[in-house]
Image (cartoon, rainbow, N blue to C red):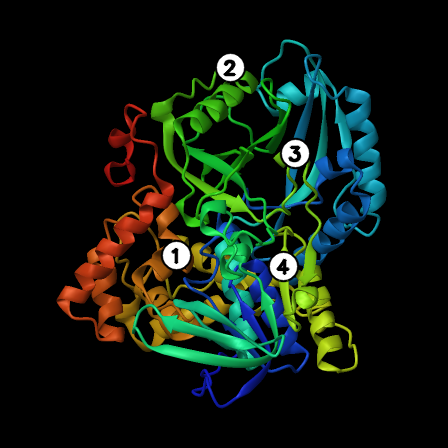
């Protein structure tokens, strides 16, 4: 069992082997790998774990079938290998899921091409345990997915990939593991300066955005894993009007938007991978947390990444394509419960359509810019974060003059998977009667084997079994666990990225006052601070907003209209 360790207290006297900026999936993966290999590591993040693009993906752990179309065979093989590894090392969070890719006469991609892609996908995933693809007849696919458009349908491919419904929890567990190996992790701490001395990166200056205190971290190697903020951190923001004339641009951000709807007539039970009729991009309909995630778009985005929000045009595009696939669904603007948008940190590639830009990761060495020991992470995928991290730490070891070593993360289970047989552990956990049955299911699915620690809190203090939100089986013990064991510092950290009530129908608002009271008791919040925390969470919910010009948005969720 992983034990969470207290954080080191000194941030100035110590010189770290590696400083990582950014606590998305890549930054956390690098911190975990480096700490596991014995390096002294500090990670600094201006917001919280998984507060950027890592949270706004389609939440699939996939091989990247469409990358074959662009000849990225090595990336597909890497993705499929890492997918299988996550099935094994994080079985509570990453699970196999079936996908359908229908053959329509109107598709730009003919059925024979998709069949060839399926064969290649199977060959490249030769070490998988999941079944190989199947080709379903028209009758078989419509029996499986009754709501799909039947005109021009000539069957479908059926194959397996992975899904991580709770991408935030994947990031949190990486942080827990890194801390257990001694990494210093500072959240809500914005880097204000990359310290460059004699042509070499030697650390960062930062400001704690909660306390206002300024600090400095000293390090031998600095990894800029700020995702779509890479250029902003370097002082070269994507907005050319804010950048120096000679600034080199590394990121060509592409915005992806998803919409979330309730179950509808004829909804699929599988993920559906569908060629859009307007631009031949691939649109996905994904069962997710009892509802459906539909996405996504792919448009150039140069503004500050956190400002990315869904537009009316994007919502209409996704609704149009979903209804073309499922004509009886009757999805309208009023069907949209909430939306989210994120900016992919793709390489800057002017003149190339966003959806054609390679997704392989790049670890850019700034040595030629007279900034030795500074590296920037560009691009990358949720699925392949671990390989990216291994590559980054290998580079850090090289620059530190240390011998290269095999990454232990190739076989290290996630903290919530500390058992030889997760299925057996899950069954045994669900047989306990300490918490109600639906709460037990929630705990095991979100926390894995660490659910035992939450139940232990309830055993010690029965009051922590309280359901503080009348619409959710979440319990008070989870709130304290988020603070004490998972480094949450704000109510938004807890509701949006630890216990994930933000994505439930009421977004946790019905229980917000009680949650603030419980959290405040642990953190010493006054009544005024509790109200402030609730208000800040309500502001954060704008990330999930339905565009205000869509009529009826307020009827579904008043807080999420903008």
Labelled disc at residue 327: 2
Instruction: Report, in whole angstroms, how far the alpha carbon at label 3 lies from the one at label 2.
Output: 36 Å
Residue on which the image places disc 1: 439
Q: First in sequence, mark 3 or 4: give its number.
A: 3
Q: Secondary structure at mark 2?
A: loop
> In the image, residue 271 lies at what x, y percent?
59, 34
Given this view, does label 4 or label 1 mark the residue nearer the observer? 4
Residue at 16% in and 70% down: 526
4 and 1 marks in contact (CB < 8 Å): no
Between 524 and 480, the one lying in front of the other is: 524
Secondary structure of the residue carrying tag 3 is loop
At 69% from the left edge and 60% from the top edge, which residue is drawn?
363
The quarter holding residue 495 reads bottom left
Q: Disc 2 and disc 1: Cα gap in Å?
A: 37 Å
Q: Residue furthest front?
A: 245
What whole-number distance in Å separates the C-alpha atoms at marks 3 and 4? Answer: 22 Å
Q: Are marks 2 and 1 in contact (CB under 8 Å)?
A: no
The earlier-in-sequence mark between 3 and 1 is: 3
Residue 2 in sight in this render: no
The residue beneath circle 3 is 351
Which residue sits at x=75%, y=76%?
Answer: 398
Label 1 sits on a secondary structure element that is helix
Nearer the N terminus, badge 4 or badge 1?
A: 4
Q: Nearer the viewer, mark 3 or mark 1?
A: 3
- Quadrant hosting residue 496: bottom left
Up-down: is 231 above or below 520?
above
Q: Is 187 left or right of 255, judged from the image as shown? A: left
Q: Nearer the viewer, mark 3 or mark 2?
A: 3
Q: Secondary structure at mark 4?
A: strand
Q: Are there few (<14), some (14-19), or many (20+) residues within 10 Å of tag 3?
A: few
């Amino acid at each position: 069992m992983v034990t969470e360790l207290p954080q080191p207290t000194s941030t100035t006297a110590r010189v770290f082997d590696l400083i990582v900026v950014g606590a998305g999936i890549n930054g956390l993966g690098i911190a975990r790998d480096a700490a596991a290999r014995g390096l002294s590591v500090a990670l600094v993040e201006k917001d919280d774990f998984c507060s950027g693009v890592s949270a706004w993906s389609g939440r699939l752990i996939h091989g990247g079938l469409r990358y074959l179309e662009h000849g990225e065979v090595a990336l597909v093989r890497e993705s499929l290998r890492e997918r299988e590894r996550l099935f094994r090392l994080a079985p509570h969070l990453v699970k196999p899921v079936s996908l359908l890719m229908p053959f329509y006469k109107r598709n730009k991609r003919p059925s024979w091409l998709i069949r060839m892609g399926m064969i290649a996908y199977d060959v490249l995933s030769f070490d998988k345990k999941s079944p190989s693809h199947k080709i379903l007849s028209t009758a078989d696919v419509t029996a499986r997915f009754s709501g799909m458009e039947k005109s021009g349908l000539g069957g479908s491919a059926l194959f397996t990939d992975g899904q991580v419904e709770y991408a935030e929890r994947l990031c949190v567990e990486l942080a827990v593991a890194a801390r257990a190996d001694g990494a210093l992790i500072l959240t809500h701490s914005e880097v204000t300066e990359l310290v460059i001395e004699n042509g070499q990166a030697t650390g960062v200056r930062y400001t704690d955005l909660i306390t206002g205190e300024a600090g400095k971290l000293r390090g031998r190697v600095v990894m800029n894993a700020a995702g779509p903020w890479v250029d902003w951190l370097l002082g070269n923001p994507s907005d050319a009007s804010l950048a120096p004339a000679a600034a080199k641009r590394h990121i060509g951000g592409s915005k992806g938007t998803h919409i979330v709807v309730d179950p509808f007539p004829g909804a699929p039970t599988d993920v559906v991978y569908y060629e859009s009729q307007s631009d031949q991009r691939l649109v996905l309909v994904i069962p997710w947390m009892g509802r459906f995630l539909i996405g996504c778009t792919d448009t150039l985005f140069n503004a500050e990444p956190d400002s990315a929000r869904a537009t009316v045009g994007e919502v209409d595009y996704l609704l149009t394509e979903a209804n073309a696939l499922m004509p009886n669904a009757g999805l309208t603007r009023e069907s949209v419960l909430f939306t989210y948008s994120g900016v992919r940190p793709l390489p800057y590639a002017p003149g190339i359509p966003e959806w054609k830009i390679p997704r392989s990761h790049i670890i850019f060495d700034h040595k030629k810019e007279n900034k030795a020991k500074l590296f920037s992470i560009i691009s990358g995928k949720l699925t392949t974060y671990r390989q990216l991290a291994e590559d980054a730490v290998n580079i850090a070891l090289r620059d530190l003059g240390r011998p290269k070593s095999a990454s232990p993360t190739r076989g290290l289970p996630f903290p919530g998977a500390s058992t030889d047989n997760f299925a057996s552990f899950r069954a045994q956990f669900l047989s306990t009667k300490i918490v109600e049955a639906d709460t037990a299911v929630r705990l095991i699915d979100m926390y894995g084997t660490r659910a035992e620690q939450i139940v232990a809190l309830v055993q010690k203090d029965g009051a922590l079994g309280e359901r503080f939100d009348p619409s959710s089986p979440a319990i008070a013990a989870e709130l304290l666990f988020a603070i004490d064991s998972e480094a949450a510092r704000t109510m938004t950290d807890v509701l949006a990225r630890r216990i994930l009530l933000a994505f439930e129908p009421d977004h946790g608002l019905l229980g917000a006052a009680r949650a603030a009271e419980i959290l405040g008791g642990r953190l010493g919040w006054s009544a005024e601070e509790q109200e402030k925390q609730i208000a800040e969470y309500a502001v954060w919910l704008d990330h999930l907003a339905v565009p205000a010009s869509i009529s009826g948005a307020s009827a579904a969720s008043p807080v999420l209209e903008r």
